[in-house]
């Protein structure tokens, strides 16, 4: 088992702790932010998994490459791919909905 922790600056005065644990090909991620502590979608974890160190205030931002290396082949990698696909589908649906509403408005004139 391997563990890497980062301190990230979020909206609170005190930085949050983001912890990544790699164990037998499984990668888990935890964050002390309000969303992370309740098991919800947490931008701090996802930012690091995407390779961004913008919010990291601890001196180990170089460890991002280690964590992203753990992602390869893990169930989390597929879940993130599914999320990206769903986000793209949602964006396209929003655009189609907006276009349809404009057509309806134009047809009612």
Image (cartoon, helix red, strand yellow):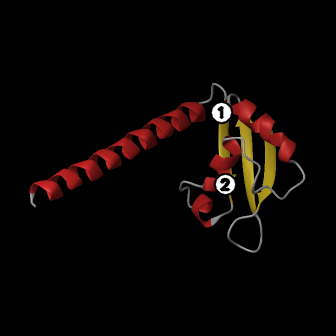
- Residue 26, label in figure: 1
Residue drawn at x 74%, y 30% as measured from the top left = 69
Please state which of residues 71 and 38 is positioned toward the viewer in this rendering: 71
The correct choice, above or below, for 38 with respect to 65 in the image is below
Residue drawn at x 58%, y 36% as measured from the top left = 76
Quadrant containing the N terminus is top right
**Nearest to viewer (mark 2 / mark 1):** 2
Please state which of residues 29 and 104 is positioned toward the viewer in this rendering: 104
- Residue 44, label in figure: 2
Residue 91 lies, in percent from the top left, at: 40, 45
Mark 2 or mark 1, earlier in chain: 1
Q: Secondary structure at mark 2?
A: helix
Residue 1 in view, yes or no: no
Looking at the image, the residue that sits furthest to the left is 108
Quadrant containing the C terminus is bottom left
Q: Are marks 2 and 1 in contact (CB under 8 Å)?
A: no
Residue 29 in view, yes or no: yes
Looking at the image, the residue that sits furthest to the front is 109
Residue 28 lies, in percent from the top left, at: 65, 42
> In the rendered image, which quarter is residue 41 located in?
bottom right
Q: Secondary structure at mark 1?
A: strand
Residue drawn at x 45%, y 43% as measured from the top left = 87
> In the rendered image, which quarter is residue 34 located in?
bottom right
Label 2 CA crowd tier, 10 Å (few <14, some 14–19, many 20+): many
Please state which of residues 70 and 106 is positioned toward the viewer in this rendering: 106
Looking at the image, the residue that sits furthest to the right is 59
Distance CA(mark 2)–CA(mark 1) = 19 Å
- Residue 2, label in figure: none
């Amino acid at each position: 088992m391997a563990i890497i922790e980062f301190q990230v600056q979020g909206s609170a005065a005190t930085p949050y702790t983001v912890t990544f644990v790699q164990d037998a090909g499984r990668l888990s991620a935890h964050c002390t932010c309000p969303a992370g502590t309740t098991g919800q979608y947490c931008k701090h974890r996802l930012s690091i998994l995407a390779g961004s160190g913008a919010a990291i205030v601890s001196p180990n931002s170089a460890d991002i490459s280690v964590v992203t290396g753990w992602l390869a082949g893990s169930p989390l990698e597929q879940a993130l791919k599914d999320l990206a696909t769903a986000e793209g589908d949602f964006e396209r649906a929003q655009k189609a909905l907006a276009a349809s509403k404009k057509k309806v408005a134009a047809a009612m004139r």
